[in-house]
Amino acid sequence: MQNQGIPREELEGKPVIGICNTWSELTPCNAHFRELAESIKHGIIQAGGYPVEFPVMSLGETLIKPTAMLYRNLASMDVEESIRANPVDGVVLMCGCDKTTPSLVMGACSVDLPTIVISGGPMLAGTYKGKRIGTSDVWRMAEGIKIGNISQEEMNEAEGAMCRSRGHCAVMGTASTMACMVESLGLSLSGNASIPAADSRRKVMAHRTGQRIVDMVREDLRLSAILKKEAFENAIKINAAIGGSTNFVIHMLAIAGRIGVNLTLDDFDRCSRGIPLLTNIQPSGEHFLEDMYYAGGLPAVIKEMQSLIYTDALTVTGKSVSENIAHANCYNRDVIASLDKPFKTETGLAVLRGNLCEGGCVIKPSAASKSLMKHRGKAIVFTDIEDYKKRVDDPALDVSPDHILVLQNCGPKGYPGMPEVGNMQLPKKILESGVNDMVRISDGRMSGTGFGTVVLHASPEAAAGGNFALVQTGDFISLDVEARSLILEVSDEELAKRRAGWAAPKPITERGYVSLYCKHVMQSHEGADMDFLVGKSSSEVTRDSH
Ligand code: FES
């Protein structure tokens, strides 16, 4: 360390704090992280610690192919081994774009040092032709291009307008959901989730996060002391109230597996049931994350929820949830509604069961069409994304708004990596008729910015030989969200017959990480972590070659 010009006495006797940085120009949402890290360092030094910044694999949603999710577990391994192998006493996790939050938290959980999260913050809302826009509008515009309502040039211009500042997607997409998740789990300072990246108070939050981690080391406040089952239940309830991304489910299951908390899909349904949508944020509503911040931020939402959650749960502040939100207030009821006058009565998340998804699947009622919450229709099955692309706009496709679009082989093993293709675009002729929603079912995921009556994460996935592999065009499917059921109306005898003719798809590669991933990835209802990564390795390294 002396070759960096650091005198010995500068380090000795001080808590050494690792700053785990996901900065990358290939992750535009995290491109401001070097500057943000400086604020964290100032806070650490001010509190008497010594900061050491180090890079880990950074996953950007927009550029990584085939999907950033394929690499979430790889990034978590990088984080775990980097923290474990280096002599750090505590860690600040710098999280932003979707996967950079769960991968860092998963890796840190497997080491279990004192750890705190700082999020990068959302972009400012965009304005285009007098209308406020964000990345959820990409979906509408893509449909508009398909039916000739807008041009590609207009969409490019709008894209520049919606991505006009530093930060991650400004709607309640997966990145914002993850920022809310860490705050509601108690892993970040209160108020972290929604401060815009461009707001100087984001830097103040980073500075205070740096200050706090030094004391957490002195108090030996580790992740395992905070991440109890109660913390997970709190986060699930708060996620339902904010209409968070369905990706929340998969990442929470994986985090719970690392820290050793028994969490199942049933916990999500039990905890979300009856919780109305409080926040009027896109894609379930009309506002943006910055509006949530101005309205009081997540602390105001949590305060509204206090009768429903464990307010005595411990957080990184060393205080309880109720102490953290003692001074929270709501300043705009149009953005953060009250529990007795919610924005929508539909909850943000429901878990469905039935013979089409033996392990379960999820839907986001708050972003779906009320009229389709109970629906029976004939399936049109696409065997993979290429099949879908080839046939969906074929004028000869026999499709009506009552049909159910089914997309197979987009699960963890099947794609591989479980891409965000579940909110597949409707057939052109359906869009041209003015219909903009149909029931869609897949074993893939949906972007948190997406919306529609979209059933996701059907598990076990088609490639793992679940009944989802056996559904055929023409089969009737009935969806009943209120009853939490998804039924394939095909007899067990017929399913057994079809199963006898089914063969697992061949692996796409026998080398490298992707091969390892395909062999070991678990199903979505288990968090899609790799089986050998479940649990902790701890921070102890007993052998020393020096
Ligand atoms: Fe990074 Fe949306 S692309 S958060």
Image (spheres, rainbow, N blue to C red):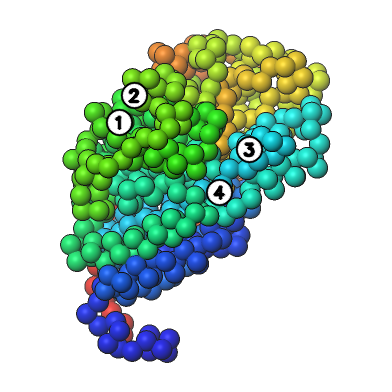
Which one is in front, 252 or 135? Answer: 135
Q: Tell me the residue that label 2 is attached to.
A: 339
Do labels 2 and 4 touch, CB within 8 Å? no
**Type of the residue with mark 3:** Ile
Q: Which residue corresponds to mark 1?
A: 305
Q: Neighbour class for label 2 at 10 Å: few (<14), some, many (≥20)? A: some
**Image quadrant in which you'd find residue 256:** top left
Alpha carbon separation for disc pair 2 and 3: 27 Å
Q: CA distance from mark 4 to mark 3?
A: 11 Å
Identify the residue position indicated by label 4 in the image.
123
Measure the alpha-carbon separation of dots 4 and 1: 26 Å
Measure how far apart labels 1 and 2 are at the Cα level. 7 Å
Amino acid at dot 4: Met
Q: Sequence order check: which comes first, mark 4 or mark 3? A: 4
Report the disc number at residue 133: 3
Are there few (<14), some (14-19), or many (20+) residues within 10 Å of tag 4?
Answer: many
Mark before the other along the chain sequence, 2 or 3: 3
